[in-house]
Image: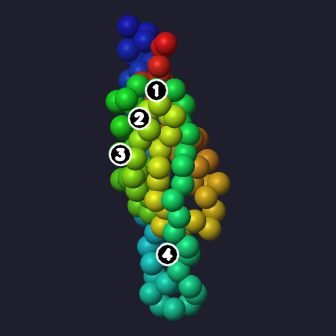
Amino acid sequence: MVRLIGKTVAAAVLLLRFLRALVVSGLQTVGVILRAGLGSRQPPAAAFLRVRFAPMSEQGAALLGCMVTLTPGTTTIDIDMEKRELLLHVLDASDTDAVLDGIRREFEPGLVRLFGDRS
């Protein structure tokens, strides 16, 4: 029973973090598009990034990939379970460390709690 409550709380916190990331990244993406469209500056360079993720099941990795893709400005291209690595495309590569930190801080803890490998 305690474990079920813990997982329910972890899922609720993960959902709230995802919704916050969705709004924040949506606003950032709109800003990038508007600035580039209005000619006030060059559009930022896009990039492909490889992101290692914490040990979790295939279901957890798939959900992580979906969450990243549903967050505006990022798309999951591939999930490599052997290397525990996501291949991402990011619209704005001006601060890739912040992108990686956001994924690790906002999404991974809840996913590990829900789908962490027990091997």
Which residue appears farthest toward the bottom when viewing the image? 39
- Sequence-wise, the earlier of marks 2 and 4 is 4
How far apart are the two marked residues, 3 and 4, measured between alpha carbons? Answer: 23 Å
Indicate the amino acid at tag 3: Cys
Which residue is rendered at x = 48% and y = 67% of the image? Answer: 91
Question: Residue 23's x, y, as percent?
Answer: 43, 58
Q: Nearer the viewer, residue 16 or 61?
A: 61
For mark 4, what is the residue?
31
Q: Is residue 4 left or right of residue 87?
A: left
Indicate the amino acid at tag 4: Gly
For mark 2, what is the residue?
61
- Marks 1,2: beta carbons within 8 A: yes
- Sequence-wise, the earlier of marks 3 and 2 is 2
Q: Nearer the viewer, mark 2 or mark 4?
A: 2
For mark 3, what is the residue?
66
Label 1 neighbour load within 10 Å: few <14, some 14-19, many 20+: many
Q: Is residue 39 left or right of residue 77?
A: right
- Sequence-wise, the earlier of marks 4 and 1 is 4
- Sequence-wise, the earlier of marks 1 and 3 is 1
Indicate the amino acid at tag 2: Ala
